[in-house]
Amino acid sequence: MGADGCVTLTLHIQPGARKTELAGLHGDALKIRLAAPPVDGKANAALIDFIADRLEIARSAVRLKSGQSSRRKVLEVSGVAETRIAGLAA
């Protein structure tokens, strides 16, 4: 956890999948398949919604820090314990 109380998540995204789901690890990143297409920010919005829903936090607590147009994304999550974040990969 950072000094500001935020946790950073490194993700590998596969947009346009059949369904939105966690798909294990991809190198050092958590792989997520998204049903949303990579068009007009739809995949990024779906990613934020998915992470907020899985962690049971407000959508506003999840921020896309980098990777707006890349498969590799970094999210910043506030207001959640690192143990809950670690539970995503389990």
Image (cartoon, rainbow, N blue to C red):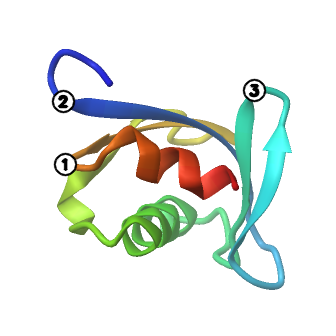
> In front: 80, or 67?
80
**Residue labelled with disc 1:** 79
Which residue is the site of mark 2? 5
At which x and y percent is residue 41?
48, 61
Amino acid type at mark 3: Asp
Q: Does the CB distance between marks 2 and 1 fall below 8 Å?
A: yes
Q: Which residue is mark 3?
A: 28
Mark 1: few, some, or many residues within 10 Å (few <14, many ≥20)?
few
Q: What residue is drawn where x is 67% and y is 51%?
A: 89
Tag 2 secondary structure: loop
Could you tell me the amino acid type at mark 2? Gly
Residue sitting at 65 percent across and 62 percent down?
Answer: 38
- The alpha-carbon separation of the residues under discs 3 and 2 comes to 22 Å
The residue at the point 59 percent across, 56 percent down is 88
- The answer to which quarter of the image holds residue 37 is bottom right
Decide: few, some or many residues near mark 2? Use Cα within 10 Å; few <14, some 14-19, many ≥20: few
Of the image marks 3 and 2, the number of the one nearer the N terminus:
2
